[in-house]
Image (cartoon, rainbow, N blue to C red):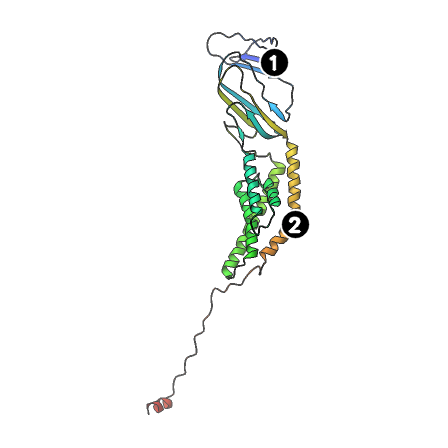
Amino acid sequence: PVGVNVQEVTLDGSARPWRPDGGRLRITLPAGSHRIDVRWHQERGMTIAYAMPRVHLHAPAANALLILNLPPYRWLLFVHDSAWGPSVLFWGYLIFALMVALVLGRIPGSPLTSRRWALLALGLSQISALGASIVAGFFLALAWRQRRPIKRAIAFDALQVGLVIWALVTASLLYQAIETGLLFHPDMQVAGNGSSNTELRWYMDRVSEMTPAAGVLSLPLWVYRVAMLVWALWLASSLVRWVVWAWQAFTETGAWQPLRLFRSKTPPPADPPASPTQAGDAQT
Protein backbone atom coordinates (compact mmCIF):
# COMPACT_ATOMS: atom_id res chain seq x y z
CA PRO A 1 0.00 0.00 0.00
CA VAL A 2 0.98 3.62 -0.55
CA GLY A 3 2.71 5.37 2.32
CA VAL A 4 3.85 2.32 4.28
CA ASN A 5 7.24 1.79 5.89
CA VAL A 6 8.60 -1.69 5.17
CA GLN A 7 10.35 -2.98 8.28
CA GLU A 8 11.33 -6.56 7.50
CA VAL A 9 11.31 -9.07 4.65
CA THR A 10 12.15 -12.72 5.33
CA LEU A 11 12.39 -15.69 2.98
CA ASP A 12 11.99 -19.05 4.71
CA GLY A 13 12.92 -17.35 8.00
CA SER A 14 16.07 -15.65 6.65
CA ALA A 15 16.22 -11.87 6.32
CA ARG A 16 16.41 -10.49 2.81
CA PRO A 17 17.36 -7.02 1.61
CA TRP A 18 14.50 -4.99 0.18
CA ARG A 19 14.23 -1.92 -1.96
CA PRO A 20 10.70 -0.55 -2.28
CA ASP A 21 10.37 1.20 -5.62
CA GLY A 22 7.29 3.31 -6.29
CA GLY A 23 5.00 1.22 -4.10
CA ARG A 24 6.45 -2.08 -5.36
CA LEU A 25 8.55 -4.62 -3.49
CA ARG A 26 10.56 -6.95 -5.74
CA ILE A 27 11.77 -10.24 -4.30
CA THR A 28 13.87 -12.80 -6.15
CA LEU A 29 12.76 -16.37 -5.46
CA PRO A 30 14.61 -19.59 -6.24
CA ALA A 31 12.69 -22.53 -7.62
CA GLY A 32 10.42 -24.46 -5.28
CA SER A 33 7.93 -23.64 -2.54
CA HIS A 34 8.86 -20.87 -0.10
CA ARG A 35 7.40 -18.73 2.65
CA ILE A 36 7.69 -14.95 2.44
CA ASP A 37 6.97 -12.63 5.38
CA VAL A 38 6.72 -8.91 4.77
CA ARG A 39 6.21 -6.62 7.76
CA TRP A 40 5.38 -2.98 7.33
CA HIS A 41 4.08 -0.08 9.39
CA GLN A 42 1.36 2.27 8.26
CA GLU A 43 0.63 5.37 10.33
CA ARG A 44 -3.13 5.54 10.51
CA GLY A 45 -5.39 5.13 13.47
CA MET A 46 -8.49 3.04 13.91
CA THR A 47 -11.27 5.32 12.69
CA ILE A 48 -15.00 4.66 12.43
CA ALA A 49 -14.54 3.04 9.01
CA TYR A 50 -11.36 0.96 8.80
CA ALA A 51 -10.35 -1.03 5.72
CA MET A 52 -7.71 -3.72 5.62
CA PRO A 53 -4.71 -2.82 3.40
CA ARG A 54 -4.76 -4.54 0.03
CA VAL A 55 -1.69 -5.98 -1.68
CA HIS A 56 -1.37 -6.37 -5.45
CA LEU A 57 0.36 -9.66 -6.16
CA HIS A 58 0.50 -9.29 -9.99
CA ALA A 59 -0.42 -12.97 -10.22
CA PRO A 60 -3.27 -15.29 -9.24
CA ALA A 61 -3.14 -16.67 -5.70
CA ALA A 62 -4.91 -19.22 -3.53
CA ASN A 63 -5.95 -19.49 0.12
CA ALA A 64 -5.88 -15.78 0.97
CA LEU A 65 -6.41 -15.29 4.72
CA LEU A 66 -6.86 -11.89 6.37
CA ILE A 67 -6.80 -11.47 10.17
CA LEU A 68 -7.67 -8.25 11.97
CA ASN A 69 -7.04 -7.98 15.71
CA LEU A 70 -9.47 -5.32 16.88
CA PRO A 71 -8.05 -3.12 19.67
CA PRO A 72 -9.73 -3.63 23.06
CA TYR A 73 -10.74 0.03 23.21
CA ARG A 74 -12.96 -0.23 20.10
CA TRP A 75 -16.64 -1.21 19.93
CA LEU A 76 -17.30 -3.34 16.86
CA LEU A 77 -20.48 -2.42 14.97
CA PHE A 78 -20.41 -3.97 11.49
CA VAL A 79 -18.08 -5.79 9.12
CA HIS A 80 -17.90 -5.55 5.33
CA ASP A 81 -15.96 -7.81 3.01
CA SER A 82 -15.77 -9.49 -0.37
CA ALA A 83 -14.72 -12.87 1.04
CA TRP A 84 -16.02 -15.45 3.46
CA GLY A 85 -15.69 -13.88 6.87
CA PRO A 86 -17.39 -12.94 10.12
CA SER A 87 -20.90 -11.64 10.70
CA VAL A 88 -22.19 -9.49 13.54
CA LEU A 89 -25.36 -11.25 14.70
CA PHE A 90 -26.14 -8.86 17.55
CA TRP A 91 -28.19 -6.42 15.49
CA GLY A 92 -30.56 -9.09 14.24
CA TYR A 93 -31.08 -10.31 17.79
CA LEU A 94 -31.67 -6.74 18.99
CA ILE A 95 -34.29 -6.10 16.28
CA PHE A 96 -36.07 -9.30 17.28
CA ALA A 97 -35.99 -8.27 20.95
CA LEU A 98 -37.45 -4.84 20.13
CA MET A 99 -40.24 -6.44 18.10
CA VAL A 100 -41.08 -8.70 21.04
CA ALA A 101 -41.08 -5.62 23.29
CA LEU A 102 -43.59 -3.86 21.06
CA VAL A 103 -45.84 -6.94 21.14
CA LEU A 104 -45.62 -7.22 24.95
CA GLY A 105 -46.64 -3.59 25.31
CA ARG A 106 -49.86 -4.24 23.37
CA ILE A 107 -50.96 -7.21 25.47
CA PRO A 108 -54.08 -6.32 27.54
CA GLY A 109 -53.05 -5.81 31.16
CA SER A 110 -49.34 -5.48 30.35
CA PRO A 111 -47.49 -3.87 33.30
CA LEU A 112 -45.22 -1.83 31.00
CA THR A 113 -45.74 0.22 27.88
CA SER A 114 -44.09 -0.70 24.60
CA ARG A 115 -41.53 2.07 25.07
CA ARG A 116 -40.51 0.80 28.51
CA TRP A 117 -40.37 -2.77 27.28
CA ALA A 118 -38.07 -1.61 24.47
CA LEU A 119 -35.80 0.29 26.85
CA LEU A 120 -35.61 -2.75 29.11
CA ALA A 121 -34.76 -4.94 26.12
CA LEU A 122 -31.86 -2.68 25.14
CA GLY A 123 -30.01 -3.36 28.38
CA LEU A 124 -31.00 -7.01 28.61
CA SER A 125 -29.58 -7.66 25.14
CA GLN A 126 -26.15 -8.28 26.72
CA ILE A 127 -27.37 -11.28 28.73
CA SER A 128 -28.69 -14.54 27.38
CA ALA A 129 -32.08 -14.79 25.72
CA LEU A 130 -33.19 -17.14 28.50
CA GLY A 131 -32.25 -14.57 31.15
CA ALA A 132 -34.14 -11.81 29.34
CA SER A 133 -37.18 -14.09 29.08
CA ILE A 134 -37.06 -14.76 32.83
CA VAL A 135 -37.08 -11.02 33.59
CA ALA A 136 -39.98 -10.35 31.20
CA GLY A 137 -41.88 -13.35 32.52
CA PHE A 138 -41.61 -12.06 36.09
CA PHE A 139 -43.38 -8.81 35.18
CA LEU A 140 -46.12 -10.70 33.36
CA ALA A 141 -46.53 -13.17 36.23
CA LEU A 142 -46.98 -10.34 38.74
CA ALA A 143 -49.58 -8.68 36.52
CA TRP A 144 -51.46 -11.97 36.25
CA ARG A 145 -51.23 -12.46 40.02
CA GLN A 146 -52.76 -9.02 40.59
CA ARG A 147 -55.69 -9.62 38.24
CA ARG A 148 -56.56 -13.20 39.16
CA PRO A 149 -56.14 -14.07 42.82
CA ILE A 150 -56.23 -17.76 43.69
CA LYS A 151 -58.73 -18.95 46.30
CA ARG A 152 -57.23 -22.29 47.31
CA ALA A 153 -54.79 -21.71 50.13
CA ILE A 154 -52.17 -24.28 49.11
CA ALA A 155 -52.06 -23.04 45.49
CA PHE A 156 -51.98 -19.42 46.64
CA ASP A 157 -49.05 -19.97 49.00
CA ALA A 158 -47.15 -22.03 46.42
CA LEU A 159 -47.51 -19.17 43.93
CA GLN A 160 -46.27 -16.64 46.50
CA VAL A 161 -43.16 -18.72 47.23
CA GLY A 162 -42.52 -19.10 43.52
CA LEU A 163 -42.82 -15.35 42.96
CA VAL A 164 -40.31 -14.65 45.73
CA ILE A 165 -37.76 -17.00 44.16
CA TRP A 166 -38.53 -15.54 40.73
CA ALA A 167 -37.94 -12.01 42.08
CA LEU A 168 -34.50 -12.96 43.44
CA VAL A 169 -33.49 -14.48 40.10
CA THR A 170 -34.77 -11.38 38.26
CA ALA A 171 -32.79 -9.07 40.54
CA SER A 172 -29.60 -11.05 39.93
CA LEU A 173 -30.15 -10.93 36.16
CA LEU A 174 -30.67 -7.15 36.21
CA TYR A 175 -27.47 -6.78 38.21
CA GLN A 176 -25.67 -8.99 35.69
CA ALA A 177 -26.90 -6.78 32.82
CA ILE A 178 -25.61 -3.63 34.54
CA GLU A 179 -22.28 -5.23 35.45
CA THR A 180 -21.75 -6.56 31.93
CA GLY A 181 -22.53 -3.21 30.35
CA LEU A 182 -20.33 -1.12 32.63
CA LEU A 183 -17.33 -3.40 33.20
CA PHE A 184 -17.02 -5.89 30.36
CA HIS A 185 -16.59 -5.73 26.61
CA PRO A 186 -19.88 -5.88 24.68
CA ASP A 187 -20.73 -9.23 23.14
CA MET A 188 -21.63 -8.51 19.51
CA GLN A 189 -22.22 -12.21 18.78
CA VAL A 190 -19.57 -12.45 16.07
CA ALA A 191 -19.60 -15.74 14.17
CA GLY A 192 -18.05 -17.11 11.00
CA ASN A 193 -14.65 -18.51 9.96
CA GLY A 194 -13.47 -18.89 13.55
CA SER A 195 -13.84 -15.16 14.31
CA SER A 196 -14.56 -13.55 17.67
CA ASN A 197 -15.24 -10.09 19.06
CA THR A 198 -11.53 -9.22 19.00
CA GLU A 199 -10.15 -11.34 16.14
CA LEU A 200 -11.79 -11.14 12.72
CA ARG A 201 -10.80 -13.61 10.00
CA TRP A 202 -11.58 -13.49 6.28
CA TYR A 203 -10.77 -16.21 3.76
CA MET A 204 -10.89 -16.50 -0.03
CA ASP A 205 -9.81 -19.66 -1.83
CA ARG A 206 -8.94 -17.93 -5.11
CA VAL A 207 -7.88 -14.35 -5.85
CA SER A 208 -7.04 -12.92 -9.23
CA GLU A 209 -4.28 -10.46 -8.34
CA MET A 210 -5.20 -8.44 -5.23
CA THR A 211 -5.92 -9.61 -1.73
CA PRO A 212 -9.63 -9.49 -0.85
CA ALA A 213 -11.25 -6.32 0.47
CA ALA A 214 -12.39 -6.32 4.10
CA GLY A 215 -13.04 -3.78 6.82
CA VAL A 216 -15.00 -2.90 9.92
CA LEU A 217 -17.13 -0.12 11.36
CA SER A 218 -16.38 0.61 15.01
CA LEU A 219 -16.68 3.28 17.69
CA PRO A 220 -14.62 4.07 20.78
CA LEU A 221 -15.56 1.80 23.67
CA TRP A 222 -16.42 4.76 25.91
CA VAL A 223 -19.46 5.44 23.69
CA TYR A 224 -20.86 2.05 24.68
CA ARG A 225 -19.97 2.65 28.33
CA VAL A 226 -21.82 5.99 28.37
CA ALA A 227 -24.87 4.41 26.72
CA MET A 228 -24.98 1.63 29.31
CA LEU A 229 -24.52 4.15 32.14
CA VAL A 230 -27.55 6.09 30.90
CA TRP A 231 -29.52 2.85 30.74
CA ALA A 232 -28.43 1.89 34.27
CA LEU A 233 -29.61 5.28 35.60
CA TRP A 234 -32.95 4.84 33.84
CA LEU A 235 -33.29 1.36 35.30
CA ALA A 236 -32.54 2.62 38.82
CA SER A 237 -35.21 5.34 38.58
CA SER A 238 -37.72 2.88 37.13
CA LEU A 239 -37.07 0.29 39.83
CA VAL A 240 -38.35 2.71 42.45
CA ARG A 241 -41.78 2.66 40.81
CA TRP A 242 -41.66 -1.01 39.84
CA VAL A 243 -40.92 -2.15 43.40
CA VAL A 244 -43.98 -0.31 44.71
CA TRP A 245 -46.17 -1.82 42.02
CA ALA A 246 -44.66 -5.29 42.54
CA TRP A 247 -45.43 -5.17 46.26
CA GLN A 248 -49.01 -4.11 45.61
CA ALA A 249 -49.45 -6.94 43.11
CA PHE A 250 -47.78 -9.44 45.44
CA THR A 251 -50.00 -8.54 48.42
CA GLU A 252 -53.28 -8.33 46.50
CA THR A 253 -55.86 -10.15 48.69
CA GLY A 254 -53.09 -10.84 51.20
CA ALA A 255 -49.52 -12.09 51.15
CA TRP A 256 -50.20 -15.49 52.75
CA GLN A 257 -53.13 -17.74 53.52
CA PRO A 258 -53.12 -20.14 56.48
CA LEU A 259 -53.08 -23.77 55.50
CA ARG A 260 -55.61 -26.25 56.91
CA LEU A 261 -54.33 -29.54 55.73
CA PHE A 262 -55.82 -31.69 58.58
CA ARG A 263 -59.27 -31.32 60.06
CA SER A 264 -60.17 -33.22 63.25
CA LYS A 265 -63.59 -34.88 63.00
CA THR A 266 -65.16 -35.49 66.47
CA PRO A 267 -67.47 -38.54 66.42
CA PRO A 268 -71.03 -38.00 67.75
CA PRO A 269 -71.55 -38.95 71.42
CA ALA A 270 -72.68 -42.54 71.93
CA ASP A 271 -75.87 -43.38 73.87
CA PRO A 272 -75.24 -44.40 77.51
CA PRO A 273 -75.70 -48.11 78.28
CA ALA A 274 -79.12 -49.02 79.62
CA SER A 275 -79.45 -49.93 83.29
CA PRO A 276 -80.72 -53.41 84.32
CA THR A 277 -84.06 -51.95 85.50
CA GLN A 278 -84.62 -50.22 82.20
CA ALA A 279 -83.70 -53.41 80.39
CA GLY A 280 -86.24 -55.40 82.39
CA ASP A 281 -88.94 -52.87 81.74
CA ALA A 282 -88.18 -53.04 78.04
CA GLN A 283 -88.62 -56.83 78.09
CA THR A 284 -91.87 -56.53 79.99
Where the C terminus falls, by quadrant? Answer: bottom left
Residue in the foreground of this view, choosing between 158 and 212: 212
Query: How many discs appear?
Result: 2
Residue 54's label in the rendered image is none
x and y percentages locating residue 135 in the rendered image:
56, 46
x and y percentages locating residue 90 in the rendered image:
55, 34
Where the N terminus falls, by quadrant? Answer: top right
Quarter location, residue 122: top right
Residue 6's label in the rendered image is 1
User: Is the residue marked by circle 2 packed among few (<14), some (14-19), or many (20+) residues within 10 Å?
Assistant: few
Answer above or below: position of 256 versus 129: below
x and y percentages locating residue 274 in the rendered image:
38, 86
User: Is the residue marked by circle 1 packed among few (<14), some (14-19), or many (20+) residues within 10 Å?
Assistant: some
User: Which amino acid lies under the numbered mark 1 shown in the image of this protein?
Assistant: Val
Answer above or below: position of 144 versus 114: below
Answer above or below: position of 16 versus 63: above
SS category of the residue bearing label 1: strand
Q: Is residue 17 left or right of residue 63?
A: right
Q: Residue at x 64, y 44 (%)?
A: 235
Disc 2 + disc 1, Cβ < 8 Å: no
SS category of the residue bearing label 2: helix
State the CA–CA distance, disc 2 to disc 1: 60 Å
For the question of whether residue 60 can be seen, the reply is: yes
Residue 240's label in the rendered image is 2
Residue in the foreground of this view, choosing between 57 and 19: 57
For the question of whether residue 73 can be seen, the reply is: no
Q: Residue at x 66, y 46 (%)?
A: 237
User: Which amino acid lies under the numbered mark 2 shown in the image of this protein?
Assistant: Val
Q: Going from the N terminus, do you reach mark 2 or mark 1 first? A: 1
Q: Residue at x 54, y 46 (%)?
A: 134
Q: Residue at x 66, y 40 (%)?
A: 230
